[in-house]
Image (cartoon, rainbow, N blue to C red):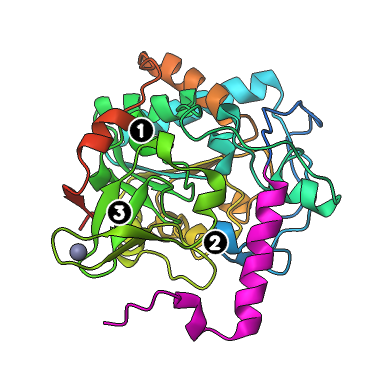
Amino acid sequence: MDRKLETDSSKPQSIVQEALSRVSALLSALSTASTSTASNPQPEGPPPPPRGSSSLFSAGSSDKGAPLDPTEFFDPEPQLRAKVRQLAELVRKADKVVVFTGAGISTAAGIPDFRGPKGVWTFEARNEKPPPMPSILSVKPTPTHMALVAMLKHGKLDYVVSQNVDGLHLRSGIPRDQLAELHGNLNVDRCEGCGEEFYRSAGKVDWGEAARKAYRAEMCPACGGRIRDSIVHFGDALPRRAFVSSIHRSQNCDLGLVLGTSLTVSPACDVPEHVLRRRKPLVIVNLQPTSLDDEATVRIWARTDRVMEMLCAELGWDVPPTADLDEQLTRSFGRYTLDS
Ligand SMILES: [Zn+2]
């Protein structure tokens, strides 16, 4: 197989330049955004945003899809409580819940989202330079991540489909065979030859490095192939097995739960539609409009941490204390492969 050192040399120069400028724009815009304040108490949002077609590091100004309106919407407290009770009832009846997650579940961990008031593209649109990103290791799983672990322990969680590359689902304790990281994982490298994956400690990666397509010095111990980062960069296809598995699990679940994503990045955003096509309930929790709002069984406008903590309380579940399995995962280096 072709193992060129300079993989980008096969692409037209204009695309290379475009990719580099996008990565550069992203890096300059990444910030330590924390949770933002409520800006609007209205329960209903504006029309859904148009969709873009991009991945995290390819999402430049020309294809990020949504207009840059960072407004967030919040349900009034009584409505929020009623909606969480509805969600709890759906979870009680479900055996297989598939959860779709996006940047909104990690903002409480200090990682900025894209379209929120302190989002990457919100800063970019204002030509402002936000503060630097926190170190990967200092970022820990949020209450939302841990509530999903509780859902797993109670036998309800079938699968997590995430657009996040921060690696927090894996570090919180979601098993690899129940997780599809559609845009890759900062901590995971993959052999181009046999597909074997390798974990690098969160203490050894940084955001800047992750934004570059990078080959490692080591060769694959199984097949001798080249090992590179697993991030879905500009021009990369989504990881096929993870994507196919996401669709299959979505088609066979009995409840879909969207957490913290505006569902604007294609094709990842198309996955929850498979739940609706099978006429199964879909619950959406996000502070900004999504393209599936009109079809959602329950539409909740609130922070995901709040909703998941309320949900666990309603169901009588304890939310496990914050876990970080980074060290355990590091020890598994080279001993796990893609889900099949
Ligand atoms: Zn290999």
- Residue 78 is situated, as x and y percent measured from the top left of the image, at 66, 19
- Residue 305 is situated, as x and y percent measured from the top left of the image, at 54, 25
Please state, as top left, top right, bottom left or bottom right, where the C terminus lies in the image: bottom left
Residue 171: which numbered mark, if any?
1
Distance between the alpha carbons at the discs numbered 1 and 3: 22 Å
Question: Image height check: is 35 above or below 60?
Answer: above
The amino acid type found where label 3 is placed reads: Arg
- Residue 24 is situated, as x and y percent measured from the top left of the image, at 67, 58
Q: Which residue is mark 3?
A: 249
Mark found first going from the N terminus, 3 or 2: 2
Please state, as top left, top right, bottom left or bottom right, where the N terminus lies in the image: bottom left
Q: Splitting the image into 4 quarters, where does residue 98 fall?
A: top left
Q: Splitting the image into 4 quarters, where does residue 39 fall?
A: top right
**Element type at marker 2?**
loop
Q: Which residue is mark 2?
A: 55
Which of discs 1 and 3 lies nearer the camera? The answer is: 1
Distance between the alpha carbons at the discs numbered 3 and 2: 21 Å
Distance between the alpha carbons at the discs numbered 1 and 2: 22 Å
Which of discs 3 and 2 lies nearer the camera? The answer is: 2
